[in-house]
Amino acid sequence: MELDHDQLHKLLAVLADSDIQEFRLEGEDFRLEVRRNLPATSLGAPSSTLVTADSIPSSIPQQTSKVEVSSPGNPPPAVPATRADLVDITAPMVGTFYRAPAPGEPPFVEQGSRIGIGQTVCILEAMKLMNELESEVGGDVVEIVVDDGTPVEFGQVLMRVKPV
């Protein structure tokens, strides 16, 4: 079994829209595991989504595999537990997080900014495509969790908003 990048991307999108918490796919030369919303770790912090691959399929170019799949030894950083009154804005895909529309331009939002539903809050770059992420909640940005230019995983918390 071989997966090309488009098939992998579609598979992850389907999983994102489902209630599936854990998924494993194995082929002759690879194993893909996707886990999300895992119980708290021993340190008390919730685990982020984890996508691992024991061997990356030869049909996926190496430069994209570094962005699309993280190795088991390099999990995403743990994010402290969120307050019950805050809503997490999470990454709907794997990519690179950018706070501004272009280098040198002001960020879409700052900590303390008030945002509206449908307002662009960041850009996620995936395969040289710039995907604007629109907020699904209106409120005040309490925390921006990810640094500009940082690779992010599917489901990783990007920022926290206090709804109004």
Image (spheres, helix red, strand yellow):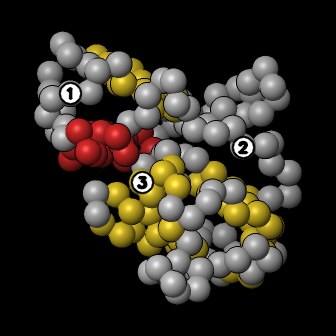
Q: Amino acid at mark 2?
A: Val
Camera-side residue of 43 and 82: 43
Give the number of the disc on residue 83: none
Badge 1 local density, few (<14 within 10 Å), some, or many (20+)? many
* Amino acid on which disc 1 is placed: Pro
- Which residue type carries mark 3? Gly
Q: Which residue is mark 3?
A: 95
Residue 13 x, y percent position in the rendering: 37, 47
Mark sitting on residue 79: 2
Confirm whether residue 29 shows in the render: yes
Q: Is residue 8 above or below residue 124?
A: above
The C terminus lies in which quarter of the figure? bottom right
Q: Earlier in the sequence, mark 3 or mark 2?
A: 2
| Badge 3: residue crowd in 10 Å (few <14, some 14–19, many ≥20) | many
As displayed, is residue 74 above or below residue 15? Answer: above
Circle 3 sits in a helix, a strand or a loop, which is it?
strand
Reply above or below: 160 against 73.
below
Farthest residue toward the top?
28
